[in-house]
Image: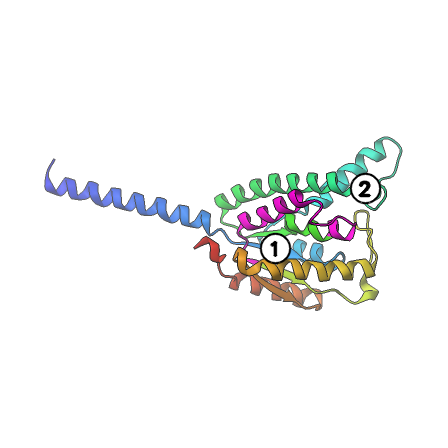
Amino acid sequence: MSRARSLVVAVCTFAALALLASSAAFARHQRAVVLTGGPGVGKTTIAKALAKRGYLIVPEAARLVIKSEQDKAARRGKRYLPKLPVVNWLPFQERVLNVHKVIEKRARRQAAKTGQTLVFDRSAADGLPFLVQSGHSPKKHYDLFKRHLQHLKNARYDTILLLEPLDRSQYVNDAQRRETAQESQVLQSRLHDLYTRTAKRYGFKVISVPALPVDQRVDLVIDLIEKSKPNRRSK
C-alpha cells in the first residue's frame, strides 16, 4: 500500500472513530428535563404547549396506569377512583415505576433518532411523596424507595422544573386527579424537598417556575430548557 493511500485510510478511520465518539457523547448527554409539582400546578397544559413546539413529551406513568384501571373497571360496570381505600398504593406505585421505565426507554430511543429534547411529565421518583402521604414510610418500605431513587440517579436528568402552584381558584380535579387543594400543597412541599435534597448528589439542577399566564409560563419554561446544562454526572 502506497504512503498516500495509507494516509487516506488513516484519515478516514480517524474520522469514523470521531463520529462514533461524538454519537456516543450525544447519547450520554441527551437533553432531558422533568416537569414536576403538586397536582393541579399546570404540568399538562405546559406539556401540550411544548409538544406543539417540537419537544418530545414523555407522559406521566401514573396517569396511564390510572386510566388503564378506570377502563377495566368501566368494562365491568364499576368505577375506579385513585384514592384510598380503593388503591393499594404499594403495588400501584410498583406498577407505575415499571411503566415509567418502559415509556422512558422508548422515548430515549426516539429522541436519539430525532435529536429532540425530552420533557418528562414527572419522573418515577415523583411517586415517593405520594407514598409518604398515604402513610408508607421509607424505613418500612426501603427497597421500593431505593429502587425509585436509583432510577432517578441513573436517568441523569439535566434539570428539574418545579412548577409553583396556581391560584387556589384555578385548582380543579379531573378523572385521574382526586387530591384536594390542601393535599396538593403538601405534595408540592414534599416534591421540593425530594429534589433539592438529591440534586447535588445526582447531578441535576432544580429550578422553580412561578405561576404566570400560560403563554408567559410556556416561554419561560422553553427558555429554561434551552439554557439547561448537561447533568454533571454525564460529563
Tell me where the magenta segment starts and ends, as one range.
130-159
Q: Is residue 68 left or right of residue 24?
A: right
Location of residue 14 in the rendering, given as x and y in whole percent from the top left corner: 26, 45
Q: Which mark identifies residue 3?
A: none
Location of residue 94 in the rendering, given as x and y in whole percent from the top left corner: 69, 40
Which colour scheme appears in the figure?
Answer: rainbow
**Local SS, label 2:** loop
Residue 197 visible to an observer of this rendering: yes
Pick the quarter of the image with the C terminus.
bottom left
Q: Is residue 105 left or right of residue 218?
A: left
Looking at the rendered structure, the kind of residue marked 1 is Val
Q: Residue furthest right?
A: 77
Q: Nearer the viewer, residue 122 or 116?
A: 122
- Tell whether label 2 touches label 1 (CB within 8 Å): no
- The residue drawn where x is 75% and y is 56% is 39
- The residue drawn where x is 63% and y is 50% is 123
Q: Which mark identifies residue 34?
A: 1
Looking at the rendered structure, the kind of residue marked 2 is Val
Is 105 magenta? The answer is no
The residue carrying pointer 2 sits among few (fewer than 14), some (14 to 19) or many (20 or more) residues within 10 Å by Cα, namely some
Q: Nearer the viewer, residue 7 or 95?
A: 95
Residue that label 2 marks: 87
Location of residue 225 in the rendering, given as x and y in whole percent from the top left corner: 56, 61
Q: Is residue 106 left or right of residue 174?
A: left
Is 141 magenta? The answer is yes
Pick the quarter of the image with the N terminus.
top left
Specify which label sits upstream in the sequence, 1 or 2. 1
Location of residue 229 in the rendering, given as x and y in whole percent from the top left corner: 49, 61
Residue 65 occupies which quadrant of the picture?
A: top right
The residue carrying pointer 1 sits among few (fewer than 14), some (14 to 19) or many (20 or more) residues within 10 Å by Cα, namely many
Q: CA distance from mark 1 to mark 2?
A: 26 Å
Give above or below for 105 relative to 138.
above
